[in-house]
Amino acid sequence: MSQRRVVITGMGVVSPLGSSLAEFWESIVSGASGIGDLSKLDAALYPRPRSAEVRGYDSVDEHNDESLKPFGQAVGYTIAATRMALDNARLDIDPDTPNDYAVMVGTTMGNQDVVERTIDLYGLTEEDDTHPEMGTQLQFFSPALLSSEVAKRFSCYGQSATLVNACAAGNYTVGLAFDRIRSGRNKVILAGGADPFSRTCYTIFHRLSASSADVCRPFDKDRTGMIVGEGAAMLVLEDYEHAVERGAHIYAEVTGYALNCDAYHATAPHPEGRGAIQAMQRALDMAGLTPGDIQYICAHGTGTQANDSSEAEAMFRVFDKALANVPVSSIKSMLGHCMGAASALEAVSCALALEHQKLPPTLNTEAVDPDFPFPLDVVPNRSRPAKLSHIMSNAFAFGGNVSCVIFSKPSQPLGVH
């Protein structure tokens, strides 16, 4: 099969920075924060009750959609983000016409909130037997529903897949969608990530002492941890010629990616960034680029001691002294860490950065850690203009799962492949 070009023609978000594409981007460039006091759980149970909860969802259609009520929150978020992405792409899908359009959604917790809701509904404890009516509730637990409901509701008759690759899952879906479209298997794939606000997830990071008591300070010498978030982002990835034929607006092109698992530890990153180094190098190779071609790195940047040190080491190993000329930022300083939605939201941010030629900023970082192998140019507080042709976006996850995607400014038409 010939290799096709893969472009982004539509995007939709449900996030702690708002539940519309315009609000999301305006919040990013202005350096707004979606982090606040914990309200979705009992804050008295947590010594560090900070969170990044979705804002503006009550104003979208899906908030009042009764058909979504039995599902987990992430399904509703995903449906809303998909509708926005399709509207943004101006892609009308005729349910009566066969198509090869596929759906790929990444997640960490899936529909874990369904289990928590069921436990609360029946007042269950560890000593209780299973309640006979629990099956009615738990039929909506399967993570597969995140993609299958999108496929059903928007008449996508190609493949439907939910990828559970923790915090790298959004990039995983973009990368695999890129592969399928590039090889000619699909013309359109709806790809992204979603996660609900789950007390399971929140408590895990709290017990790992990974959460911050105030704000997220990625790469700062005084960083104290991450902030748990939630949300969804979906992107319309499309065969370039299919997009041109229907007159679609092209935000960005996906030009390379790599997936990797160094399997170093269940929760800790490899201290020298072994998997991250390999993923960045392979993504550059696939895109036919060198480190000197990258004008911006959208970092994983959680604000934890271990992750930021590992990522800084990996970036230096790949870029060497060229890293001095590559701005780096982490939008998790504004969004919190939205788990499976994180790198999907970052993909949207990268596409918009290329569209508007602006660098997303990092909040709260005042002094970059001097123990890093090389000083980082961390974009502070507000967006700044830049000439952007190629962006690298990193996403790392528990278990050593690593993903890297290269987003590029659309080049001149290349004709028929």
Image (cartoon, grey):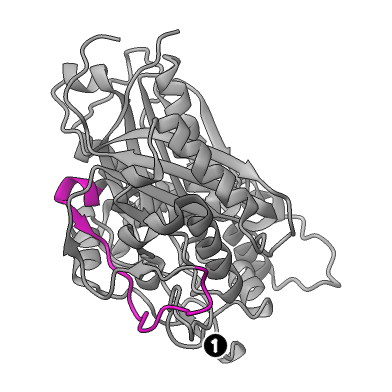
Q: Disc 1 marks which residue?
A: 48
On the image, the x and y values in percent for residue 151 come to: 44, 31
Quadrant where the N terminus is found in the figure: top left
Left or right of 404 in this view: 322:
left
Quadrant (top left/top right/bottom left/bottom right) for the C terminus:
top left
Q: Nearer the viewer, residue 214 or 2?
A: 2
Q: Is residue 356 magenta?
A: yes
The amino acid type of the residue labelled 1 equals Arg
Q: Nearer the viewer, residue 30 or 150?
A: 30
Q: Counting other residues with Cα less than 10 Å from the Cα at mark 1, is it few (<14), some (14-19), or many (20 or more)?
A: some
The span picked out in magenta is 352-373
> Which one is in front, 401 or 315?
315
Residue 382 lies within the magenta run: no
Quadrant assignment, res 326: bottom left
* Residue at image location 39% in from the left, 39% down from the top: 290
**Residue 340 visible somewhere in the drawing:** no
The answer to whether residue 16 is visible is: yes
Q: Which image quarter: residue 113?
A: bottom right
Q: Total of numbered circles in the picture?
A: 1
Q: Is residue 324 left or right of residue 310?
A: left
Residue 354 rendering spot, x and y as whole percentages: 22, 46
Residue 263, placed above or below residue 131? above
Q: Nearer the viewer, residue 260 or 149?
A: 260
User: What is the magenta segment's predominant secondary structure?
Assistant: loop
Give the residue at x 54% y 41%.
Answer: 145
Residue 397 in picture, x, y percent from top left: 60, 56
* Residue at 47% in and 47% down: 170
The local secondary structure at tag 1 comes to loop
The structure residue drawn at horizontal position 26% and vertical position 75%, both measured from the top left corner, is 381
